[in-house]
Image (spheres, rainbow, N blue to C red):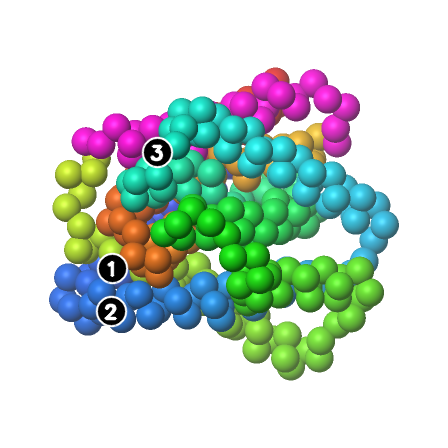
Amino acid sequence: MELAKTCLIQILIMFILVAVGYLCGRIRMIDKTTNSKLSAFVLDVVNPVLIFNSYQKEFSVQLLKNLGLAVLLSGASYALIMIFLRIIYRSDRSSDTVITRFAAIYSNCAFMGIPLLNGLFGSEGVMYLTGYITVFNLMVWTHGVALFSKDGGTDIKKILRSPSIIAIAVGLICFITQIHIPDIILQACTHIGNCNTPLAMICAGVTISFTDIGQYLKSRKVLMAVIARLIICPVMFWAVFRFFPLPETVFLTVLVASGCPAAATGTMFALKFDGNSEMSAVVFAATTVLSAITLPLVVMLGAI
């Protein structure tokens, strides 16, 4: 009951933020050009700061071991859904397929996952979630960028120079070597990082305001993305790893993260790379609403 309440609260918060963006789009306070620039600001400034902040923690050997296990399990979770989608979509690289594949692979693991896991396992669960978030950021800025690139290729040098990848590398070094930035700078970075969720939701809301939602809700690709994101991804992970001798907290952390709704990053990438941002916003909204039902079921599945 408590978990369902937490899910509902987080979903309501997201939709209030999305509604603000929708209203700003409808009254043309934020137009498409401004929305595109705002999403670029989130991706290239706010997101990297948030990533770096997540590593400003006290070092622990056991914590590092379990965190490493969470990273490995997270990578396995991504591999499973990517193999499944590769079989389903084969060589289809149309704009709509790119959107739905991205949505099926990448979840809103931070915004939804942090409060849920904090309620279930406290700060330990949140720490292990950073392992999943680390893999998310590595994958989204390599594989995710490659999905959206017009030629389907990946410019490794450009990706390695991206702010988020640099933030991951610097953050990990600081965590392992226990380099802590001055408190006044950390507080400023925290304020910037806290902008990530509201700005991402607002960008999604503005995009929806320019979208014919009914047109996309009838799409089979949208339905497939919703099913893959909320059901297939967590169920496959559970089926493969449930009976391995894994720490329960680590296993359930990755399971919950893999069952979260689609990432708002997909909409921002679509805006940045001139993809179908309208479809991405619809998938984001649909998976968020339905996750109020599926996420509690995913946790119940993990207890079996």
Residue at the (18%, 50%) spot, across then down: 211
Residue 280 percent coordinates (x, y): 31, 46
Find numbered disc 1 in the image and state the secondary structure of the residue it sits on.
Answer: helix
The kind of residue tagged 3 is Asp
Q: Comparing marks 3 and 2, which lies closer to the viewer?
A: 3
**Residue that carries the numbered disc 1 in the rendered image:** 206
| In this view, 5 is above or below 195 | above
Q: Are marks 3 and 2 in contact (CB under 8 Å)?
A: no
Find numbered disc 3 in the image and state the secondary structure of the residue it sits on.
Answer: loop
Camera-nearest residue between 157 and 19: 157
Residue 212 percent coordinates (x, y): 14, 46
Q: Is residue 66 visible?
A: yes
Find numbered disc 2 in the image and state the secondary structure of the residue it sits on.
Answer: helix
Q: Estimate the spatial distance between the alpha carbons at disc 3 and disc 2, rounded to whole Å.
A: 29 Å
**Residue that carries the numbered disc 2 in the rendered image:** 33
| In this view, 86 is above or below 175 | above
Q: Is residue 24 visible?
A: no
Q: Residues within 10 Å of mark 3 (few under 14, many from 20)?
A: few
The kind of residue tagged 2 is Thr
Residue at the (57%, 57%) spot, across then down: 156
Camera-nearest residue between 17 and 160: 160
Q: Residues within 10 Å of mark 2 (few under 14, many from 20)?
A: few
**Residue that carries the numbered disc 3 in the rendered image:** 92
Horizontally, is 131 left or right of 34 in the view? right
Residue at the (40%, 25%) spot, across then down: 88
Secondary structure of the magenta portion, mostly?
helix
Q: Dividing the picture into quarters, in which one does residue 170 lie?
A: bottom right
Residue 283 percent coordinates (x, y): 31, 41
Q: Estimate the spatial distance between the alpha carbons at disc 1 and disc 2, rounded to whole Å.
A: 11 Å
Magenta highlight range: 218-247
